[in-house]
Image: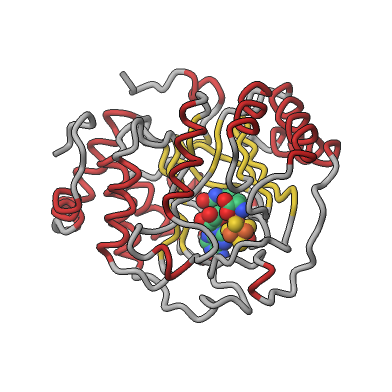
Amino acid sequence: MENTSSKWTQESARAIYDLPLMDLLFRAQTVHRQNFDPNKVQTSKLLSIKTGGCAEDCAYCSQSARNGSKLTASKLIEVQRVLTEARKAKDGGATRFCMGAAWREPKDRDMDALVAMVEGVREMGMETCMTLGMLDDNQVIKLRDAGLDYYNHNIDTSERYYSEVITTRTFADRIDTMNRVQNAGIKVCSGGILGMGEQNQDRVDMLVTLANLAPAPDSVPINMLMPQEDTPLADAKPIDPIDFVRVIALARIMMPKSYVRLSAGRSEMSDELQAMCFLAGANSIFVGETLLTAENPEEDTDAVLFAKLGIQAETPEDHACPEVAE
Ligand code: SAM
Ligand code: DTB
Ligand code: SF4
């Protein structure tokens, strides 16, 4: 079942996930080449605009106030500081600027500053993305009118495993915000984290939920858990790297036109593993030495990797007109 208009089932997706690896990779790379230039990778830059002190209890997160993390909580940072960082990101070649806040949801008093951030980054000619937690209808409209291109809201894992990781909100709450965002015409960025103790079937089920959204998210970040000190998942057993590659390949096959982002965890990955992820259809990364709070490869390291693999960073022109896409 690879017709995108059909609904994926847990069984149909699992059958692909379980293919011999070479068959799975060949299929994923074939789908990838039908939709994207295989030697281009989109680059996004993250900035934490409000760090720590979050009311949610996400078991993986260094920013939850409930996780006893040593991280100092900050207030929403100044608009001007955001624009200075965005300018640096643009000069470094990033095409999308993603602003993340450690909130359960934004307060209405923060909206003017958030709108100014979106407008300012857009004026620089970069795509804008925000991840601020749950949004109500008014907040969605304000961000849409400011020109927000993408909203990141991860489902993180399967519906079955969700309550093992987060208890302060439900899987359905997550889907509600995504629907609100999508209905307002903002593109959705949604994916999850692998290596939180979930089973392979949870990973497959997470992708089934994402692929069955109408439409599927434009961007699908696949994060490898970065274990954070003092969190319940600090000692989680790492995911097998081949299982990680299988999830990327399945995401590519199930969501052929979406950008699949090889997100958190690259600083712990070998060049070979990252190359396999690109072969499996990943075509986006976060660049810069910091994600929100955790480390990411240095720009020089990524430049060497891209040169070795003959990969080029996607430009805004490529993005507007993919060479191979229909
Ligand atoms: N508070 C907002 C929310 O949760 O939607 C936005 C920020 S939150 C940090 C964004 C995403 O980062 C999470 O949904 C999760 O998927 C990812 N993330 C957070 N901590 C991580 C970690 N230690 N390892 C991998 N991914 C992580
Ligand atoms: C996503 O899926 N990964 C990014 C972004 N969306 C916001 C965040 C990764 C965070 C990694 C842990 C940290 O930096 O604190
Ligand atoms: Fe808060 Fe987001 Fe971290 Fe959860 S993932 S604790 S909502 S910042």
The colour scheme used to paint the residues is secondary structure
- Residue 270 location (% of width, % of height): 45, 64
**Of the pair 157 and 282, the residue shown nearer to us:** 157
Q: Going 65% across and 33% down the picture, which residue do you hit?
A: 139
Q: Is residue 19 left or right of residue 279?
A: left
Give the quarter of the image for residue 148: top right
Q: Is residue 264 left or right of residue 192?
A: right
Q: Is residue 83 left or right of residue 68?
A: right
Q: Specify whether residue 296 is in view.
A: no
- Residue 218 location (% of width, % of height): 43, 33
Position of the C terminus, as image quadrant, is: top left
Q: Quadrant of ligand 2?
A: bottom right
Q: Going 13% across and 39% down the picture, which residue do you hit?
A: 1
**Of the pair 225 and 57, the residue shown nearer to us:** 57
**Of the pair 265 and 237, the residue shown nearer to us:** 237
Q: Going 30% across and 64% down the picture, which residue do you hit?
A: 242
Q: Going 73% across and 21% down the picture, which residue do you hit?
A: 123
Give the quarter of the image for residue 322: top left
Q: Specify whether residue 241 is in view.
A: yes
Count of picture labels: 0
